Image (cartoon, grey):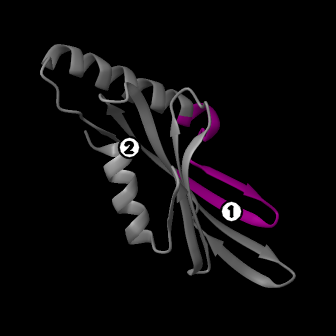
């Protein structure tokens, strides 16, 4: 999924949006060919959303991986999320939570304690113009 940025130059914005969408889809297909991964002790499902951020001139991706781990302690469910750029030059923001407890994130010097705070900051800093 790709969100479209607003711009004063519609054709340039459309080109940047399309390029971002393609780069993100290529990255996702390379790293998550069928959107799933499994081992004898875990199962993961990944999804992404891409967005061309005109002010930063970057293609950002919000990558979400839902994992169910099975170990000697029982079962653990985690849903980490990261904001990365399509060139994979590193994570700009991360959110983690296991079994619905101890949520936390780090975003450009901001710390959040809830998923709602995470969503608000991610949208404001990366996924909106």
Q: Write down the quadrant of residue 21 in the picture.
A: top left
Residue 106, compared with residue 13, is above or below; it is: below
| Residue drawn at x 46%, y 25% as measured from the top left | 23
Q: Position of residue 111 (x, y in %)?
A: 52, 64
Give the tally of numbered discs.
Answer: 2
User: Could you tell me which quadrant the C terminus lies in?
Assistant: top left
Read off the residue under disc 2. Answer: 126
Q: Write down the quadrant of residue 56 in the picture.
A: top left
| Residue drawn at x 49%, y 50% as measured from the top left | 47
Q: Which residue is most to the right?
A: 72
Category of crowding for the residue at label 1, using alpha-carbon neighbours closer than 10 angstroms: few (below 14), some (14–19), many (at least 20): some
- Observer-nearest of 73 and 56: 56
Read off the residue under disc 1. Answer: 43
User: Could you tell me which quadrant the N terminus lies in?
Assistant: top left
Residue mark closest to the camera, 1 vs 2: 2
Q: Is residue 127 left or right of residue 42?
A: left
Residue 95, compared with residue 63, is above or below; it is: below
Q: Which residue is most to the bottom?
A: 73
Residue 29 among magenta residues: yes
Q: Position of residue 35 (x, y in %)?
A: 56, 47
Of marks 1 and 2, which one's residue comes earlier in the chain? Answer: 1
Q: Is residue 104 left or right of residue 116?
A: right
User: Could one spot residue 79 in this view of the protein?
Assistant: yes
| Residue drawn at x 38%, y 61% as measured from the top left | 119
Q: Position of residue 121 (x, y in %)?
A: 38, 57
């Amino acid at each position: 999924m790709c969100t479209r940025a607003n711009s004063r130059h519609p054709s340039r914005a459309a080109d940047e949006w399309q390029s971002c969408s393609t780069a993100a889809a290529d990255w996702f297909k390379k790293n998550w060919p069928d959107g799933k991964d499994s081992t004898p002790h875990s199962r993961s499902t990944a999804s992404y959303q891409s967005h061309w951020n005109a002010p930063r001139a970057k293609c950002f991706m919000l990558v979400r991986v839902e994992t169910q781990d099975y170990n000697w302690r029982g079962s653990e469910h985690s849903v980490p999320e990261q904001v990365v750029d399509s060139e994979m030059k590193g994570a700009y923001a991360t959110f983690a939570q296991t079994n619905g407890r101890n949520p936390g994130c780090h975003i450009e010097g901001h710390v959040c304690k809830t998923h709602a705070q995470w969503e608000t900051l991610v949208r404001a800093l990366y996924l909106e113009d």
